[in-house]
Amino acid sequence: MAKILTEEEQLVLRNKAKAELERLETELSDSETKKMIDNYKEKFSLCEIVYKIIFDEHQFKKTGEHPQRMQIKMTQVPHALNFAGYTYDKNLLTNLFGGEDRVGRRTVKKLRDALTHSMSKSAVEELRSREQELHGYMDEFLNVIKNFDNQAA
């Protein structure tokens, strides 16, 4: 059970929440920064949605059930994509969906998580400095999906 806060502790907590809201509003008041973040998150959403279509079918064929909750795990990504007949460079998949979370080296997914759940200054700066590289990983993944040979073998 959570400890009940004193009035002073509540005030400190409310001021902390207010300061964070003000920081976020300031960060997002810059239209270029907001556009950069939105474009990045939207493109990753495309990658995630498309992958989950494949993963859902992979899991259904494997277990006979559609997964209730679909998480992207690098241990499963290559298998699901191979199941669908796609060939991807493992390095690309690692840079896109992997678990590296060190500032300056975050994967596309981990940086999206950081921008979505905390929008720290370091996450925004990392996106700004690596934007072209990170979009390149997403574009490469989406281009394979988009440009597959739709002729049966």
Image (cartoon, helix red, strand yellow):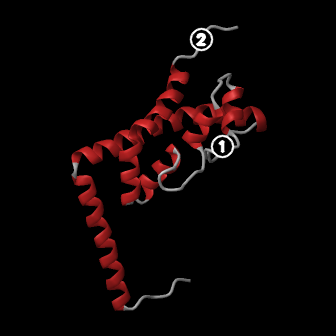
Residue at 59% over, 12% down: 149
In the image shown, does 22 or 108 lie closer to the viewer?
108
In the image shown, does 56 or 30 lie closer to the viewer?
30
Up the image or down, 2 lies above or below 72; here it is below
Q: What type is the residue that disc 1 sits on? A: Met
Q: Which residue is tagged 1? A: 74
Please provide percent x and percent y for residue 131: 39, 40
Separation of residues labelled 1 and 2 (CA atoms): 26 Å
Element under disc 2: loop
The image quadrant that residue 144 belongs to is: top right
Please provide percent x and percent y for residue 94: 61, 40
Q: What type is the residue that disc 2 sits on? A: Asn
Please provide percent x and percent y for residue 62: 77, 35
Residue at 39% over, 60% down: 120
Residue at 62% over, 36% down: 91
Is 39 on the left-hand or right-hand side of 71? Answer: left
Up the image or down, 68 lies above or below 138; here it is below
Q: Which residue is tagged 2? A: 150
Quadrant in which the C terminus appears: top right
